[in-house]
Image: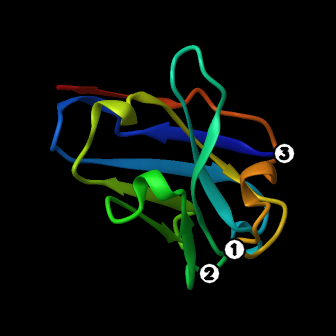
Amino acid sequence: QVQVVESGGGLVQAGGSLRLSCTVSIARFDDYAMGWFRQPQGKEREGVSCISNVGHSADYVDSVKGRFTMSRDNAKSTLYLQIDSLKPDDTAMYYCAPLRYAYCLNSWPRAAFGGWGQGTRVTVTS
């Protein structure tokens, strides 16, 4: 059974920063790569970033490279997403999820399992 709780979203101006957090309840948290996903209103959910099981590698969708930094604290079963230089296009509900393997394989955006939490909303104004 998987439970996730996302937090840290908010309303910010373009160019600002946020730090999202996600606490995960899952057996053997450090067996799994983890992903951040986002869903703009009226659009499909997309993968944003992935981090390997022990945090040695990460992958990002092109639109956020250089602005988003994902990290994890396995001792706390917690993920983080540092978001800098926010743009209005970053406005979305953000979710985290475990992935079906330990590393960020090319298919990671389709590898989430365990269901979705309530998410945390990020709204960026221009």
Distance from the alpha carbon under mark 2 to that under mark 3 = 21 Å
Residue drawn at point x = 26 percent, y = 43 percent? 86
- Residue type at mark 3 is Gln
Distance from the alpha carbon under mark 3 to that under mark 1 = 15 Å
Q: In which quarter of the image is residue 70?
A: bottom left
Along the line of sight, the residue nearer the viewer: 113 or 29: 113
Residue count near mark 3 (Cα–Cα under 10 Å), binned few <14, some 14–19, many ≥20: few
Residue to which mark 2 is pinned: 54
Residue drawn at point x = 15 percent, y = 44 percent? 15
Q: In which quarter of the image is residue 65?
A: bottom left
Q: Which of marks 2 and 3 is in front?
A: 2
Q: Quadrant of residue 58?
A: bottom right
Q: Where is residue 30 in the image (x, y as percent from the top left)?
A: 69, 74
Q: Position of residue 83 (x, y in %)?
A: 32, 52
Kind of element beneath mark 2: loop
Residue 71 position (above or below residue 4): below
- Residue type at mark 2 is Val
Do residues under tags 2 and 1 come within 8 Å of each other at their CB atoms?
yes
| Label at residue 30 | 1
Residue 84 position (above or below residue 9): below
- Residue type at mark 1 is Asp
**Mark 3 or mark 1, earlier in chain:** 3
Q: Position of residue 20 (x, y in %)?
A: 39, 47
**Mark 2 or mark 1, earlier in chain:** 1
Residue drawn at point x = 76 percent, y = 58 percent? 99
Do residues under tags 2 and 3 come within 8 Å of each other at their CB atoms?
no
| Label at residue 57 | none
Q: Is residue 53 visible?
A: yes
Kind of element beneath mark 1: helix
| Label at residue 1 | 3
For this orientation, the residue located farthest to the top is 42
Kind of element beneath mark 3: loop
